[in-house]
Image (cartoon, rainbow, N blue to C red):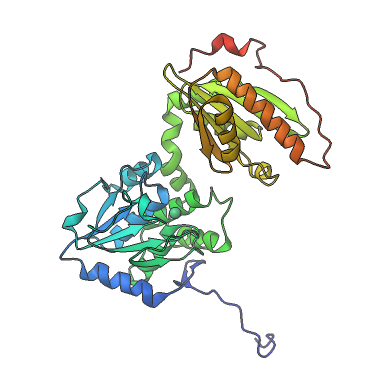
Amino acid sequence: MSGTPAGRPVPRPDGWAFGRGILPYPKDRALLWNLVSEMIDGREGGVMVYAHHNADLDAVATALVLKRTFPWVKLGAFKSISTPGRKLLTAMKEEMAVDPDLTIFKLVVIVDSSSALQVSDGNLSSWPRHWVLDHHAEHERWGTEHYNDPNMGACVEIALQIAMMTNLPLDREMAVAGIAGIIADTGKFRFARASDMSACSFLLNGSDVRMEDVLDVIEGEEYFDVSKKIAQLKAMRRVQFQKVGDQIVATSRVTSFEAAAARALLVAGADVVFIAADRPDELRISSRAKPHILRLGVHLGNFMDEIGKLTGNEGGGHDGAAGLNGKGNADKILSLCMKKMAEEIERRSRGVKVKHEETLGPMDGKKASDDLRSDG
Ligand SMILES: [Mn+2]
């Protein structure tokens, strides 16, 4: 057809076609090829693919794709592996050693880690030769060979590029791992870029994997975690909330699974939540906020730091997820959090008409304190 004006490039996918999606080419093929060569050359002496502390889905997925590409590599993680990461390993029938002896390997490939502290006590001087494969924007200057591509929403996308570079046909397991890593690192696609969606499309189209299969692998077992479900439902029953303008600040209490309880209340409609995990020897408060609250300028880490100072405890964390550890009366600290957060949202929502409503109690009308000590 002659419809394209002269000089204007015909649009076409920039990357490997596989089914109807595409996988972008590596940003630096020569550098990535150096790593591939070393992983092949290291075959005799042993290659360890090493994930960060509490290895998450993306780190485990990256390791799994590299394992299927270079079957001689061994997988390891610093200190621990996250629950979803372990589920993915089980589904793939692969093992990842925790704190393996690294000195017996010729090459260690650190994956999905932006600093030495994520994979060690900070000192890598006694380590064998090592490479870093990462996608974090705030990537540390490693004193070693590294390949970092922050344009990749998940590190596993780089592992897939490596597999494609070796001309290995991708398989079902790699597709499941790839999609799982991308889902996890894009906040279930909330922060996904076009290239991440395209990589998922690439994997779904090139395999018989369905999105549902991947979700079953990474969250299916939650449907059978009865203590967690009970904790979430109890958190719903004990909720207290306050309306500030059109925003909702909520508090509740559990004895465990406070992060899951916080998520449940956010899904149920709260915009900021504070959940106390009240145990005989310690008090923990977890807080979470939705992105539009952060855009007001609220920073939960700073907020919990301040609550910590006011109550003689230690608080801090990230902008959207923070906590506090220590001792004290859970109800009093929760109402302090509610009051201060309501004030902060009110102050920051200039131009928006804000009116405080009376604090609303549990749905059944009982006092929250009636059932505080009977958490699952
Ligand atoms: Mn990652």
Where is residue 338, by image quadrant? top right
Quadrant showing the N terminus: bottom right
Please tell me which residue is depicted at 61% across the width and 34% down the height of the picture. 266
Give the residue at the far bottom of this rendering: 6
Please tell me which residue is depicted at 72% across the width and 31% down the height of the picture. 343
Ligand 1 appears in which quadrant?
bottom left
Residue in the foreground of this view, choosing between 245 and 171: 245
In the image, residue 204 lies at what x, y percent?
47, 58
Q: Answer whether residue 238 is visible to the viewer in this image.
A: no
Please tell me which residue is depicted at 56% across the width and 56% down the height of the picture. 192
Residue in the foreground of this view, choosing between 210 and 98: 98
Q: Is residue 105 left or right of residue 191?
A: left
Residue in the foreground of this view, choosing between 116 and 130: 116
Residue 60 versus residue 274 in the image, above or below: below
Quadrant showing the C terminus: top left
In the image, residue 184 lies at what x, y percent?
48, 49
Residue 115 versus residue 240 in the image, above or below: below
In the image, residue 240 lies at what x, y percent?
65, 21
In the image, residue 34 lies at what x, y percent?
32, 74
